[in-house]
Image (cartoon, grey):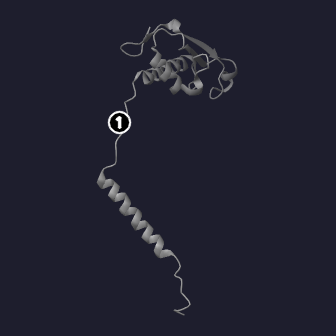
Amino acid sequence: MIQITDTISLHDSDFQLDFIRASGPGGQNVNKVSSAVQLRFDAAKSSALTDDIRKRLKQISGRRMTSEGVLIIEARRYRTQERNREDAINRMIALIRQAAEKPRQRRRTKPSPAAKQKRLTAKRYRGEIKRRRRSVRISAEDA
C-alpha cells in the first residue's frame, strides 16, 4: 500500500512493474540483466483517483499516458533493478501528487491608470527617438 496524499492511496496491485533490458551504464552486464523498470498504472480504471485528478494527470503526463489512460513510466537511470524500481514508483507518486493539487483560480486584473500612463509616455518617448533618426528633407526653396 502506497500513501500518496491524505485521501489517495494505491495498492500494489493497482500498478504493474515489468523489468526490461536497459541501455546505458553497466558494461557487459547491460546485455545480461534486465535492470530497467517499466511501470504501468491504469489511471482510467483506478478507483483511487477522482475524475478531476484523472483529467489533470492526463494533462501533466503528456506522452507518458496512452489513449486508453494507462500511465507508463520507464526508469533506467540506475544500474540496479531495485533503485530503478524505487525511481519509477517515486516518479509516479510525484505525478499523482502534482495532479492532486488544484490549480489556483486566476483573477482577472486591469492595469492601473499610472501603469497605463507610464506605458504611453514610454511609447511617445520611443517614437520621438525614432522620429529624430529619420533623414531630414531639404525643400527646393531652402536650397
Judge by depth and name the residue closer to the eye, 131 or 78: 131
Q: Residues within 10 Å of mark 1 (few under 14, many from 20)?
A: few
Q: Is residue 13 among the parts visible in the rendering?
A: yes
**Image position, residue 39 (x, y; %):** 57, 16
Q: Quadrant of the N terminus?
A: top left
Which image quarter: residue 22?
top right
Q: How many marks?
A: 1
Q: In the displayed structure, would residue 46 be above or below residue 21?
A: above
Under tag 1, what secondary structure?
A: loop
Q: Nearer the viewer, residue 28 or 97?
A: 97
Q: Residue at x 39, y 67 (%)?
A: 125
Taking depth in this image into account, of 36 and 39 the one nearest to the observer is 39
Work out whether residue 75 can be spotted: no
Task: Tell me the residue at 45%/19% (across/down).
Answer: 52
Q: Position of residue 110 (x, y in %)?
A: 34, 45
- Quarter occupied by the C terminus: bottom right
- Residue 65 lies, in percent from the top left, at 58, 21
Please provide percent x and percent y for residue 25: 62, 28
User: Hey, what amino acid is under mark 1?
Assistant: Arg
Q: Quadrant of residue 72?
A: top right
Q: Is residue 92 left or right of residue 7?
A: right
The residue shown at (33%, 59%) is 118
Give the residue number, with chain letter if any, for mark 1: 107
In the rendered structure, the answer to whether residue 71 lies left or right of residue 10 reads: right
